[in-house]
Amino acid sequence: MENSENKQHSLKNSGKENLREDAKEIQKKARNFLSRLLDIREDTDRESTVEAVQKDISFKGHNAWILIFSIFVASIGLNVSSTAVVIGAMLISPLMGPIVGIGMAVAINDVDTLKRSFVNLGIMVGLSVLTATIYFFISPVKNETPELVARTYPTILDVLVAIFGGLALIVAKTKKGTIASVILGVAIATALMPPLCTVGYGIANARWEFSLGALYLFSINAVFIALSTFVVSKLLGFPLVKYANSKRRKRIAQIASTVAIIVMIPSVILFVKLLRQQVFESKSVEFIENTVRYTGAETLKSTSDYKEKRIDVYMIGNTIPMATISTWQESLGDIEALKEAELVVHQGNDQSQDLNQLSTEVRSGILEDLYVKNQEALQNKDRRIELLETELSKYRGDNFSFANLSKEAKINYEGIEEIGYSNLITTNFQKTDTIPTFTVIWNDKIRNSELTSQQEKFANWMRVRLDLDTLAIKNVR
């Protein structure tokens, strides 16, 4: 009996051991597959990549003119708020060279390339801002378009575009036998061109908050593009530049590493901050849509302030009890991103609250949102009302001058002695109609045969003259 139990136990252990071995084999094959699929180290041409990056750093001749023309095109797109035109400008923009050069130079400790990259970056920024300033100075359109406003402060989307755009470009440049085309710089141009054009707009129109905000956005995006290049270059093991003086090499390496750390730390902090802000705003919208509901009340507008950790909701309709609002506030604690936020509900019909506390800006914003939202519907209703009034005037006879019509009738029909006009309201007890009615008094000297002909002609003339299908004529002699 004991032997039988021992055999069963050893069989179970053997089965478990086989499963472990199979699991390890599957994991090993999966790692090998992913390694072959994603490994780019063997297909990386390090020397050619460094040469290509150094070649793209210079900003003169053809590159300078291409930059000027692309900035003009991008400025036009921002000026008329055309995303398609801005994208078209990005297709011809050579913006990425000096920024990628900075990231590569720091990674391989190439001080000469680093200096040249900074010089050309300054030239690129100066030429771009000057071109955009000239365009916006002579442009007759000075309005703040949504495309311009969107480039005055960095968002998590801008940072992600800069990061992944920079990664895509440097990875493409490192592949053997290929040279990254201008198309691969579109994502980088997305992060760099519009902010530089917005800086020019701010200078041309003395909107310094636009210039400073856009320049800040450009700087952040440029840092993340260079940082992406630095990271990829380090991961792929690009060889460090060798110096005859080993002490100098060591000192340059220390400086480059220090610069990289100094740039990396605030960049990571900003990225985390922007990410938290984006999560806070999206969770606020989701919370308001799913939780802030009350029968007989409607949400007019909602705003969220990440810095103040505050969510404001403006509502109209039935007064919401404080107990309900307290329940909503408690629900915020269940959401990690909103647990420190304060919910403030403004009620339009709550006399206990001073509505004057709502700032003019907020109230104007509410009215503006309502106006924009319903503008198309109001225009459609206006057109329908105008059409109905036109049709109604036909039936009422309001679209003609009775005095002029009576004169024309007297000239055409000498036998008419008197004409009267009125709107006759009739009903068959199912619907009611308003029928234009003319009463015509004819000269009693006209012969009966001629009178019948004149009356028929007069009726036909009136229908054509007034363009009415429904018309009543009473003939009196």
Image: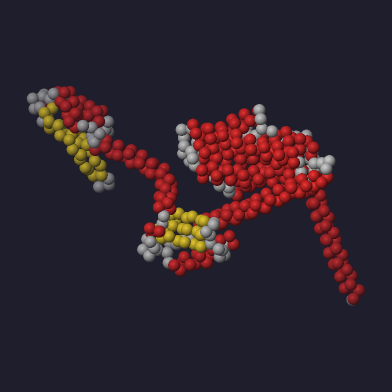
Answer left or right for 33 relative to 133. Answer: right
Q: Quadrant of the N terminus?
A: bottom right
Please tell me which residue lies in front, 376 or 170.
Answer: 170
Residue 317 in percent (x, y) is at 39, 59
Residue 220 position, x and y percent, is 62, 46
Hey, which quadrant is residue 114 in on the image? top right
The residue sitting at 42% across, 48% down in the picture is 368
Q: Residue furthest right?
A: 3
Instruction: Locate the C terminus and report the quarter of the image it occupies.
Output: top left
Give the percent coordinates (x, y) of residue 245: 83, 43
Q: How many marks?
A: 0
Viewer-proximal residue among 208 and 460: 208
User: Quadrant location of residue 161?
Assistant: top right
Scheme by which the image is coloured: secondary structure
- The answer to whether residue 331 is above or below residue 257 is below
Judged from this view, the residue extending furthest toward the bottom is 1
Q: Between residues 111 and 439, which one lies in front from this camera angle?
A: 111
Rendered residue at 87%/65% (across/down):
14
Residue 56's place in the image compared with 7, above or below, is above
x 78%, y 34%: residue: 177
Q: Is residue 308 left or right of residue 381?
A: right
Residue 231: % across, % down: 73, 47
- In the figure, 347 relative to 7: above or below? above
Would you say residue 387 is visible in this rendering?
A: yes
- Residue 235 in sight here: no
Task: Name the residue: 55% across, 63% down.
Answer: 340
**View extreme (left): residue:** 445
Left-right relation of 64 to 392: right
